Image (tube, rainbow, N blue to C red):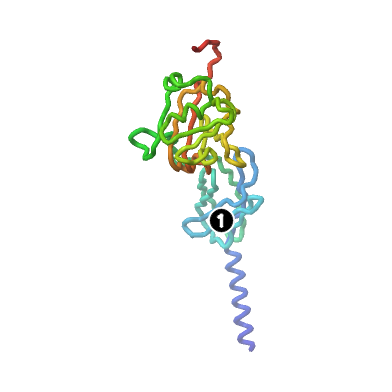
Amino acid sequence: MLRLKFWMMILVFASQVLLAQNGQIEGVVRDAASASPLAGANIEIPARRLGVSSDAQGHFVLTGLAPGRYQLSISYIGYETLRREVAVAAGETTVVTIELKARPLRGREISVVATRAVEGETPAAFSTLTREDIAERYYAQDIPVLLSELPSTTFYSEGGNGIGYNYLSIRGFDQRRISVMINGVPQNDPEDHNVYWVDFPDLLGNVEDIQVQRGAGSAFYGPPAIGGSINIITSQFSPERKLQA
């Protein structure tokens, strides 16, 4: 029993001696511009495969380090990675302040492409009316009257004159199942998906072109694009006064 106590005392004493020979690194990580603490920053000693993360106040501690010089690597999302050499003495705490510089995140290149159908490339049935086509067929009536001349497209008017409450269908689908957009902005009512052409009087007088796609469209056109889609592009605004025949 005495021998066991003796060896236990030796082990405790030896561990205290070893701990006294080690040092530690303590510090804080903060933004170089605002001096605000950075929580969750990674502080590593790559050669030792040792690392910690900073707390909510940007504080960190690396313990159990033998005396010597260590290469610290400090990284944080959105900031430049910093490397610093720090000396550790036996039984002492080396205090450091780490300031990281912000760095914009660089993503992959993004390509923005048109969503309109292209002849010979897009696998969809569609028709495009140019400004000249519209000028030849427009007689002060609403858009459904003009589009009814296209394949698989019909309309009817409550008043019988093509002005006011008009209704369009493509391939048998009524306009609640047809996505209508003006310059890429959806015009279908968010509740019943209907289109109220009466709200667009004389819109054709300022339209550059109209593209009508027949059949189910992509998700870009929204839920109504089951029977087809109509994309209306208006002419560019000009502050100059002018008359157009």
Amino acid residing under circle 1: Val
Residue 230 in the image: x percent, y percent?
48, 33
Residue 224 in the image: x percent, y percent?
52, 42
- Identify the residue at the far top of this view: 242
Q: How many marks?
A: 1
Q: Which residue is found at the position 50% from the left and 21% from the top? A: 235
Residue where numbered disc 1 is placed = 88
- Identify the residue at the far front of this view: 160
Looking at the picture, tell me which residue is in the foreground, 36 or 228.
228
Q: Is residue 164 left or right of residue 169?
A: right
- Identify the residue at the far bottom of this view: 1
Q: Residues within 10 Å of mark 1 (few under 14, many from 20)?
A: many
| The quarter of the displayed image where residue 203 is located | top right
Q: Is residue 23 above or below residue 203?
A: below
| The quarter of the displayed image where residue 64 is located | bottom right
Q: Is residue 110 above or below residue 131?
A: below
Q: Is residue 73 above or below residue 143?
A: below
Looking at the picture, tell me which residue is in the foreground, 4 or 220.
220
Looking at the picture, tell me which residue is in the foreground, 144 or 160.
160
Q: Is residue 39 left or right of residue 113?
A: right
Q: Which residue is found at the position 61% from the left and 85% from the top? A: 4
Residue 141 in the image: x percent, y percent?
53, 23
Residue 132 in the image: x percent, y percent?
42, 20
- Identify the residue at the far right of this view: 57
- Quadrant location of the N terminus in the rendered image: bottom right
Q: Secondary structure at mark 1?
A: strand
